[in-house]
Image (cartoon, coloured by chain):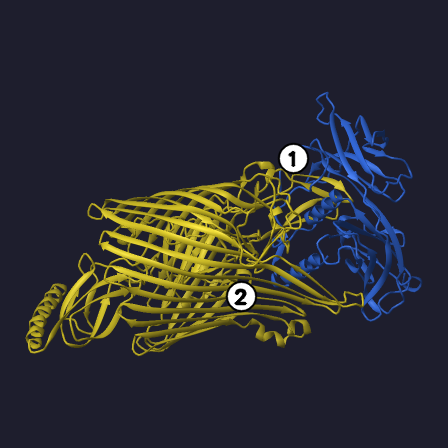
Amino acid sequence: MRVIRLTYLILLLLHILLPGCTEPIDLRSEDMEPRLVITGVLSTEPGYQIIEISSTIPYFGTGTPVSLDAREVRLNGELLVRDAPGIYSMGEEFAAEEGKTYVLEVWIDYNQDGQEEYYSATTTVPYIHVLETLSLKSLVSGNVPFLLMVGFQDTPGEDYYGAALWINDVLYSNRILRYYIHTLNDYSQDGSFIHYPIPEWIITKALPWDNEETFDLFSGDVLTVEMQTLSKEYYKFLEEAKIEKNQQFPLFSGPRGNVSGNISGGALGIFGSYASSRKSVTLPECPGLPDRQKDG
Amino acid sequence: MKRTFTIWGRIVIIFLGSILGATVSAAQTHHTLSGKIMDAAEGGILPGAVIRLFNDHVTWTLADTKGRFTMDLPEGTIRLEISYIGYQTQVSEFLLDRDKDTLFFLVPQSYYLQGVTVFAETPAIRLRKAEMSVERIDVSVIERVPTLFGEVDLLKVVQLLPGVQAASEGSSGFHVRGGSPDQNMILFDNTALYNVSHMLGFFSIFNSDAVGNMTLYKGDIPARYGGRLSSLLNVTPQDGSGKFSVDGGLGLISSKLSVQGGIAGDDLTYLVTGRRTYADLFLPLAKSEMVRNTVINFYDLNGRMRWRINDNNYLYLTLYNGRDRFKVSEMGVKFGNSVAALNWNHSFSDRFFMKIHATYTNYDYDFSGKTNEMEMEWVSRIRDVGMRTDFSYVLDRNNIFEFGYTSNFQWFQPGKAIGTGTMGTGVRIQQDITMSRRQGFVNVLYFSNEHKFFDERIEFRYGLRFTRFDNVGPTTLYRVDDNYQLIDPDGTAIPSGKFFHHEYGWEPRLGISFLAFPNISFKASYSKTLQYVHLLSFSSAGSPLEIWIPSAPSISPQSSHQLSAGIFTNLFRKDYEASVEVFYKHLDNVLDFKEHPNLLLYDKIETELRFGKGKSYGIEFLLKRNTGVLSGWVSYTWSRSFRTIPGVNNDMRYRSPSDRPHNINIVLFYDISSRLQASLNWIYATGKPITLPEGRYWFFNEFIPVYTERNSYRMTDYHRMDASLTIRLGKPERRWKHSINISVYNLYGRKNPWAINYRMTTSGEQYLEMTYLFSVVPSITWNFSF
């Protein structure tokens, strides 16, 4: 966590130091041969959980992903139901079991040579780390900005955490860049009760949203944090995906590269899992937050 | 007619003067003064050097083919003036009370008849020498190249040489023949430097007032040097002249001042110089409180002392200290170098010389940040303490031996970050992430010989270095298996002082030159080099926050084999020099990083590194004019550079970051009049390799990019023109001299990409955006001396 904070500070420093100008550049890559993509993330939270099968599209363009149908998709040997093109589900109220290993198998003739290829991946669902406390910490005595403080009992050894934010039951963390991840494996707090702020979301009267719009906040809004314990391969996938989406400064960003997946057989994508725990907190009345009834 | 009279007149005067001198001196006691004239930098002999009594045009002689001379002089205090083309004239004063045989060392200076010096050697010397791929540049050239922000910069001139390319716009880093910036050894008075940047590389730490000259070895590195794969940049400090003088410069963002002089005549000379940026001095005038409290500056101080103890003993002391400071609100970074070097030059006889160097360098940075809830500080430090002893034995004019021993202890604290505060919990806690200290001990024995045959038409140079590298505790040792997985995730604690791992290697060096015709020579060379320290950064931005680590059980030393060959010629009465050089370089254990490496304060760095092979090859064309009203050089380089590293790019070969096939440098100096000097340079280089995605897929409401090959695309080509005009003011015969330099960097405002960013339109279409640092950057500097 602190490593990430240091990076923010350094990037801010360099941003101030380097008053470079920007402008679009007429440069683009060639279109690659399409590749098969298989994605699916299992959760301990009951709900509609799916496996998606698709194909890559050229990077520069406006095309949309091409969904593909497989002959067969199985989870621990059980045949999954095709709900829509390229969408296979485990049912409406599926919940992954903590500590259980799941094997995903896909049979598909992707290269259209008349012979089916076989793809598979494995994930072991982590154990839940219960989110015991959630609070708002004001950075300026009772007013915005606030930081969300989470508290939970860590377990010794490598643990990989993620956090998603809901605002009044609307998922704010619906994109990788608005989703928070961190790991606790090397630090002195390993195995102890962890109590720290989530730096990803600085709570003010507006949070950044898509297309430079904002997600407005009002006193009385309910913020819900879902604390997720991620499987290692899923954490790694998200970590690298965040780097790829965030990469702009050439200082600490390495050469660009493919996000590591765990699908065998040469397909791209990820089959991962997480265990989740939620808690909510209400935004207080304060000078920096408008009232939804008056100003909303 | 007048010319003939003058020559004959001089001969008559000299003849008469000699007779007269002989007549007058017959009444005095005479002693024989004999000696040898040597090159202070390289130890070579200087046949043809002129030795004469100071301010006496009558009593003079020339050094013979062995650099020796003999004069019969009257007893008493003698002031001897020794001069040689391409070297600083030296005046020595001593008491001649008996027959004496002594050595005189001349410091290489510059070769010029008029106009500007381009390369600090005579064309004839360059042609005969077995060394190749070497460029020596005098400080007078450095000071004439157009500047960025008005600050003269040695490293910006290095980047204009054939086979050398800037790491990025405005950066002090450079690539030599396809190598990475960390494969360049930069020595300042024989002291290794690890980061030579001020202000993210826009300036180097070398104040031109403190630099005498510099030599860049692009591959054919002498056996007495090593430690890096690609090049050696040897920067020699400037000695004080012995005559008191003050020089200064006042620029838009920085100023500098130097004072030099002598104590006890010329026996003890000194030079002190310093410079500081002062852009932030005006920040308190700003309206914004944050801007008012911002600190952004750097300074550096240089000191140099030369003490001539006696004819056989010289002592030199070099000191440097520089620091950058940047602070905005409660966040800031400080970094800088400290260097100390003490050299003792001793001659056992007129054939046997010794130089002992004790060196110390320190580079550190300190990044700190503070909020209401917490404070943090991240520090890193490198120290290198060394001792080297070099011996030269001149068997005869055609046979010079060198041998010696060097020893360096390297101390690395890659990173130590400490955070303290409540972090919103109400309880004060402290966390620290400390990367293990790593230490290396490098010992080197070397031997080399320069041998000339067939009336000096063939020069053969060979040498051998034996290097031994030891890892020394304390540290936490991490080893990885063939799949780069940690063998022991917790590492092994190594106690202090324990030598727990070693590497050794042989580094042969060979060079030959053949003067086939009076103005044409052929040269070839081979060199092997080893590198035991590695830079963990792929930033080309001149970042101060670099991490160096030594080799270790799971970090093998990098090695390079380089073959070079070339044709060299002097044209048009040696006014012009032209050369064509080809090179091929093979690299082993060359280092790169896995995809998405974790390099930030990560102690188990062995898991993030990948090792493999690399190769570079190319051809360099150079045409230069050393003298005349219009001088300078034009170079064209075609080169390629590739890497093949298991675990990177699907194990397939890929372009190295320095693979930029075409590179043109044009550097011109024009003396418009005695008061006006103009300079212009133009640089062109193929765009830098970059990795671009070719496909994408959808996950978590984001497009995830898909790549097929590393560095398979290029940024747009780089080109830039700079110009400067120097106007000399005042009367030349006066002691007070001053001038104004007006420089324009990037004259036609080319927008060269520094970084590529990925953007998306509101309609969801991806596009690329470049960040460029500079458009047209004018600057003006006022220089003075008295």
Q: Which chain identifier belongs to the blue chain?
A: A
Q: Chain of mark 1?
A: A
Q: Residue furthest top?
A: A114
Label 2: element kind: strand
Horizontal and vertical percent position of residue B683 = 46, 52
What label sits on residue A32 in the rendered view? 1
Label 1: element kind: loop
Q: Which residue shows up at 63% across the image and 61% down it?
A: B416
Horizontal and vertical percent position of residue B770 = 61, 51
Q: Chain of mark 2?
A: B
Q: Which residue is mark 2?
A: B336
Give the quadrant of the N terminus of chain A: bottom right
Q: Residues within 10 Å of mark 2 (few under 14, many from 20)?
A: many
Horizontal and vertical percent position of residue A107 = 77, 27
Horizontal and vertical percent position of residue A201 = 79, 58
Query: Up-down: is A88 above or below B569?
Result: above
Look at label 2 and name its amino acid. Answer: Gly
Q: Which chain identifier belongs to the yellow chain?
A: B
